[in-house]
Image (cartoon, rainbow, N blue to C red):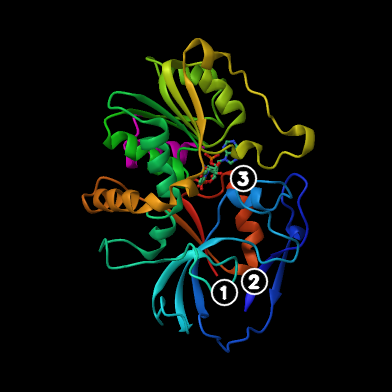
């Protein structure tokens, strides 16, 4: 087996020596209940940055020398577990590795890859997986979008943001995306049907750009980025606005005192608005609702998904960094 383990904890940006590539033999003798999967796709997610900090969170921290935690899609190659048979396709936490031996079915789902019929398997890690569910429940349940709302989305060209924007369009909202670079912004408007897009890397003043793109104010801000994007967006919220804190990727590499824990929240008060965070795992028991709705929209040609698939587990460290400089275009996935 080949796998990536955590070599040391980062302080700020994740340097290459934070990871270690290990090659080792796997004991293939199975006890009752055990099964082995071959990992087909590994989901490379911003959340991984949080999992390697030694702090209390919604999941325990990955320990030094432990296999890096990751969601993935895998095929069963040997099984002595009654729930899983050879050739089954599963989604679950298989880690950054080529093979994984398991003895529990905890949080592992069997995927029926024939439904819906026209999707690539990798879409079970993007639109039909965790990012799709994040967009769906974050908008429908947390933000409670309504037809006619102006919905502003940061990180809009990413795995979550691009799905969120399309859902908001289907629901009759006016959708404005914030993303880095002309290519991503053109994609949002021309391919995904966003009403407009703001290239935050090339505007002089994000605040003014939001004012001109959202002349009627912002009813929902779906924030993937935090920091300057959140500050600017709060200046434009309407009465009773919903600010959904999905992520804060601009802050994940900050260390110690550089972490921005303060926001100017006064607009939340003056506008009787609501600012609410959420963790998609809390919706795990309802994933089937999101999967079924998104599958239907895929079948109807109403929604698109884009995956950025990279090859080679040896390059995991380089790929992971792409998330933090905008180098990925679509859901970042590793084919080990
Ligand atoms: P993306 O596919 O959006 O990839 C990350 C993108 O973030 C980059 O491509 C880059 O896009 C943008 N970015 C990186 N650094 C910065 C910065 N300093 N300022 C502005 N933009 C930046 O990732 P995901 O869609 O998977 O995740 C998006 C967010 O959603 C993350 O914050 C993640 O933690 C959060 N999330 C939350 C979940 C929850 O349960 N609440 C579940 C899943 C994800 P660009 O080129 O536009 O700069």
State how many labels appear: 3
> Marks 1 and 3: in contact by CB < 8 Å?
no
Disc on res. 324 = 3
Towards the viewer: 97 or 56: 56
Label 1 residue SS: loop
Q: Residue at x 45, y 52 (%)?
A: 130
Disc on res. 98 = 1
Q: Residue at x 34, y 41 (%)?
A: 192
Mark 1 neighbour density, 10 Å: few (under 14) some (14–19) many (20 or more) = many
Measured as percent of width and height from the top left, residue 33 is found at 50, 80
> Marks 1 and 2: in contact by CB < 8 Å?
yes
Mark 2 neighbour density, 10 Å: few (under 14) some (14–19) many (20 or more) = many
Does label 2 or label 3 sit earlier along the sequence? 2
- In this picture, which residue range is highlighted in magenta? 181-195
Label 2 residue SS: strand
Measured as percent of width and height from the top left, residue 44 is found at 55, 56
């Amino acid at each position: 087996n080949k796998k990536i383990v955590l070599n040391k904890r980062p302080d700020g940006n994740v340097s290459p020596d934070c990871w270690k590539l290990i090659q080792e033999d796997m004991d293939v003798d199975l006890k009752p209940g055990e099964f082995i999967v071959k990992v087909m796709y590994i989901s490379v997610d911003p959340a991984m940055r949080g999992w390697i900090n030694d702090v209390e969170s919604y999941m325990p921290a990955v320990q030094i020398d432990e296999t890096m935690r990751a969601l993935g899609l895998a095929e069963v190659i040997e099984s002595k577990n009654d729930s899983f048979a050879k050739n089954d396709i599963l989604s679950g936490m298989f880690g950054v590795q080529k093979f994984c031996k398991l003895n529990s079915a905890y949080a592992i789902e069997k995927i029926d890859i024939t439904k819906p019929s026209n999707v690539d398997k990798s879409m079970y890690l993007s639109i039909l997986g965790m990012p799709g569910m994040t967009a769906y429940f974050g908008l429908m349940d947390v933000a409670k979008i309504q037809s006619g709302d102006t919905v502003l989305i940061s990180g809009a060209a990413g795995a979550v943001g691009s799905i969120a924007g399309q859902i908001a369009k289907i629901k009759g909202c006016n959708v404005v995306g914030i993303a880095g670079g002309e290519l991503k912004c053109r994609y949002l408007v021309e391919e995904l049907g966003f009403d407009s897009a703001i290239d935050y890397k090339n505007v002089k003043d994000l605040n003014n750009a939001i004012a001109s793109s959202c002349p009627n104010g912002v009813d929902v801000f779906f924030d993937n980025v935090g920091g300057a994007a959140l500050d600017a967006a709060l200046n434009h919220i309407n009465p009773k606005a919903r600010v959904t804190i999905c992520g804060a990727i601009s802050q994940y590499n900050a260390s110690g005192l550089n972490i921005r824990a303060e926001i100017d929240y006064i607009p939340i008060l003056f506008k009787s608005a609501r600012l609410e965070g959420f963790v998609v795992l809390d919706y795990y028991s309802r994933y089937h609702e999101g999967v079924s709705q998104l599958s239907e929209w895929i079948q109807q040609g109403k929604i698109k998904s884009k995956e950025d698939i990279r090859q080679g587990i040896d390059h995991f460290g380089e790929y992971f960094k792409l998330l933090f400089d905008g180098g990925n275009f679509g859901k970042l996935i590793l084919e080990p």
